[in-house]
């Protein structure tokens, strides 16, 4: 019986910051500054590897990490925009996936234990935490980030999934993991979680997930 539901953030609970900030048509950084999508994608991927596994314990450390991140982007592409402009671009895309806030609230009210397992940059999560009320449904010790563990969800040694297990009250077979990346789903299944692939088409993702959870007999959302 499923008792704990573990969510990814980007692409499941909220918009994926990375993809939208850099690659959205017309308003993403690549198009806004008339840059090659492939070059921006490649360099942003390099930055991800540099910053996705660095934690920060204070607002000052977060500010320094975020500043260093964007200064590397500005330097690489000679961007005319300021750090503030780029940070504002990130804030613009910190939005919940339609319907997910209500779904999470209903799961919480139905006494499911909720957790997060997210490949995430620490300073972006800090902004998400401040702007996404739905994250208040998750206890802080049950929010597992790559920046705090030092490994991604796809790691063959399952470091992030083991960290989840260390902070919840259930067994593996009582956990359901929800993510929008197939590689993460496959690794979660190898670890021993039940897992559901969230659709990339966010407009119907919450409705799709509701139907799956109901069909699994986990919850009746009509009550």
Image: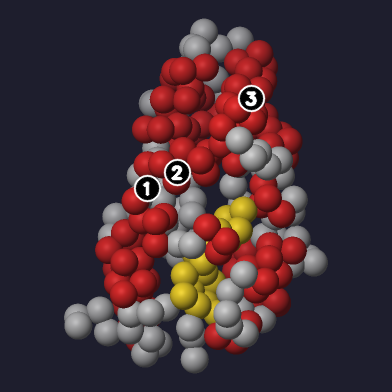
Res 103 quadrant in image: bottom left
Res 112 quadrant in image: bottom left
Judged from this view, the residue extending furthest toward the left is 222
Considering the numbered disc 1 on the image, is that residue within a helix, a strand or a loop? loop
Q: Residues within 10 Å of mark 3 (few under 14, many from 20)?
A: few
Q: How far across and how far down the image is residue 203, in percent? A: 31, 56
Residue ID for mark 3: 64
Q: Can you say whether 191 is above or below 23 in the image?
A: below
Q: Residues within 10 Å of mark 1 (few under 14, many from 20)?
A: some
Q: Kindly check if marks 2 and 1 are in contact, taking CB atoms under 8 A apart as contact.
A: yes
Q: Is residue 31 visible?
A: no
Give the numbered dot on residue 128.
2
The residue at the point 56 percent across, 32 percent down is 59
The residue at the point 64 percent across, 30 percent down is 61
Residue ID for mark 1: 132
Judged from this view, the residue extending furthest toward the right is 157
The residue at the point 67 percent across, 71 percent down is 166
Res 177 quadrant in image: bottom right
Q: Is residue 149 visible?
A: yes
Q: Can you say whether 154 is above or below 88 in the image?
A: below
Quadrant where the C terminus sits is bottom left
Please indicate whether residue 221 sits to the left or right of residue 54 in the image. Answer: left
Q: Kindly check if marks 3 and 2 are in contact, taking CB atoms under 8 A apart as contact.
A: no
Q: Can you say whether 223 is above or below 210 in the image?
A: below
Considering the numbered disc 3 on the image, is that residue within a helix, a strand or a loop? helix
Q: Can you say whether 58 is above or below 133 in the image?
A: above
- State the residue in front, 176 or 154: 176
As measured in the structure, the alpha-carbon distance from the residue carrying label 1 to the one carrying label 3 is 23 Å
As measured in the structure, the alpha-carbon distance from the residue carrying label 3 to the one carrying label 2 is 18 Å
The residue at the point 54 percent across, 20 percent down is 35
Please indicate whether residue 31 sits to the left or right of residue 161 in the image. Answer: left
- State the residue in front, 101 or 61: 61
């Amino acid at each position: 019986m499923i008792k704990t539901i573990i969510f990814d953030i980007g692409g499941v609970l909220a918009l994926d910051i990375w993809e939208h900030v850099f690659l959205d048509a017309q308003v993403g950084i690549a198009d806004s500054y008339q840059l090659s999508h492939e070059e921006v994608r490649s360099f942003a991927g390099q930055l991800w590897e540099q910053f996705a596994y660095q934690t920060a314990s204070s607002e000052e450390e977060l500010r320094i990490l975020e500043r260093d991140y964007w200064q590397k982007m500005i330097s690489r592409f000679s961007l005319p925009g300021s750090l503030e402009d780029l940070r504002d671009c990130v804030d613009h895309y910190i939005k919940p996936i339609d319907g997910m806030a209500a779904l999470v609230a209903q799961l919480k009210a139905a006494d499911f234990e909720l957790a997060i397992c997210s490949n995430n940059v620490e300073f972006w999560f800090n902004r998400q935490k401040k702007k996404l009320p739905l994250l208040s449904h998750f206890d802080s010790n049950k929010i597992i980030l790559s920046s705090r563990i030092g490994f991604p969800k796809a790691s063959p040694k399952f470091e992030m999934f083991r960290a989840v297990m260390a902070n919840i009250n259930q067994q593996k077979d009582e956990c359901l993991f929800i993510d929008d990346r197939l590689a993460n789903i496959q690794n979660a299944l190898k670890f021993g979680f039940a897992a559901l692939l969230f659709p990339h088409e966010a407009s119907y993702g919450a409705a799709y997930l509701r139907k799956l959870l109901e069909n699994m007999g986990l919850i009746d959302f009509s009550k």
